[in-house]
Image (tube, rainbow, N blue to C red):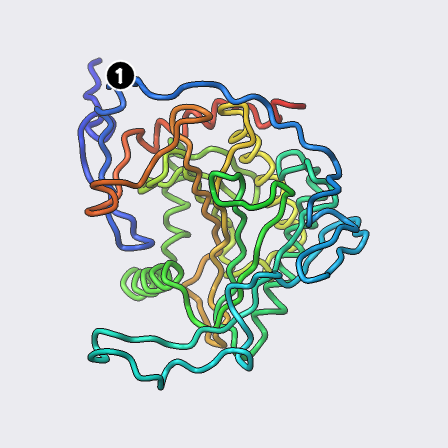
Amino acid sequence: MNIAPNPLLEQPHRRFNPLTQEWVLVSPHRARRPWLGQVEKVPPENLPAYDPACYLCPGNARAGGHQNPSYTSTFVFDNDFSALLLPEQSASTSSDPLPGPPALFRAESASGICRVVCFSPRHDLTLPQMSQAEVACVLRTWSEQTQELGSLDFINYVQVFENKGAIMGCSNPHPHSQIWAVSHLPVEPAKELAAQQSYLKQQGSCLLCDTLAAERRSGERIVAENDHFTALVPFWAVWPFELLVIAHRHSGSLPELEAAEVSALADLLRRVTARYDNLFEISFPYSMGFHQAPSDGEAHPEWHLHAHFYPPLLRSATVRKFMVGFEMLAMPQRDLTPETAAARLRQLSDKHYRG
């Protein structure tokens, strides 16, 4: 029997992201073009368990005369170089005169709290190298911080995120994440809020519940799953090996997760980040973050807890995707199809290549 080729795997086309209401151009035929750029292999990174010069390691000094305690698990502190200040520390800009018409020149005060979360005392252990119990401890810390910061009257959104690798702007290799609790709803969550609200109103169901059900029926973009979470390369992915992690149960935030779900999420995070590292046998860089329901005091039945992984690498440990030219000036574009990316990640072991 002759099976017609899938045009989505052969021909240029656009794909729609219902979560942001934006499009991405997919050009699978370009993946066949010869590559004459960088392909060199990167030597393994051998970090010590403790670095006396690291300002995140236990007992070491930080900026401003602060000293870390001799912590033995996760460690949370207010960022010494916070991007936001408390309301009482922030001068109001709303009434300040600006040069030109208000419709063209507009500024608003922004306040918040920025914190750092060290995953463990170990300078050398990233998420895939930690035990499931240790990753679960990180998740509980994120949950507790979300609950604490989100309960503050002036906080309307809590963003948990990790930048991994110097290529992603990470200033210190000691595994850590950040939490920014802000007085406003940031741009990306605002897009997702509007899309999920619109979908619920029009379809009478949850956008990500429906997405997950369709993806699990198909299976072609799923990378890993367990009883409570699924990791997949979304149909509308922009980055080469982008992942979307979706909770099976309709819940809005990390504090809503039950103990079994926290354990399952820890398991899945370890497995997918191990596959990332195994892809090019390096400590794979990415930006990752959880999108949770706003903490604005309103009910958000439309919101479904999920996490995004945005890794830049494309062909090897040194070849990354750049958002340049057409992508900066017109719209995102990718050559590698999400289906091909998922298949490559799926065939890798979830046991870390370094043991």
Residue occupying the far top of the picture:
1
Q: Residue at x 51, y 31 (%)?
A: 276
- The location of residue 91, given as percent across then percent down, is 47, 81
Where is residue 354? Give x, y as percent: 64, 23
Q: Residue at x 22, y 31 (%)?
A: 27
As rendered, which of 46 and 193 lies closer to the eye? Answer: 46
Examine the rendered structure and indicate whether residue 31 appears above or below residue 88. Answer: above
| For residue 74, above or below residue 324 | below
Figure quadrant of the N terminus = top left
Give the answer, above or below, for where 100 lies relative to 246.
Answer: below
- Residue 112 lies, with reference to residue 353, above or below; the image says below
Q: Residues within 10 Å of mark 1 (few under 14, many from 20)?
A: few
Name the element at disc 1: loop
Q: Residue at x 47, y 27 (%)?
A: 346
* x and y percentages locating residue 113 in the rendered image: 56, 68
Q: Amino acid at mark 1?
A: Pro
Residue 21: percent from left, percent from top: 27, 55
Relative placement, left or right, of 212 versus 322 is right
Please state which of residues 230 and 274 is positioned toward the viewer in this rendering. Answer: 274
Quadrant of residue 198 in the image?
A: bottom left
User: Hey, which quadrant is residue 68 in on the image?
Assistant: bottom right
Which quarter of the rendered picture does the C terminus lie within? Answer: top right
Direction from residue 236 to residue 69 in the image, left or right: right
Count the labels in the image.
1
Q: Nearer the viewer, residue 168 or 152?
A: 168
Q: Nearer the viewer, residue 305 or 56?
A: 56
| Left or right: 273 as drawn, with respect to 201 | right
On the image, numbered disc 1 is attached to which residue?
A: 34
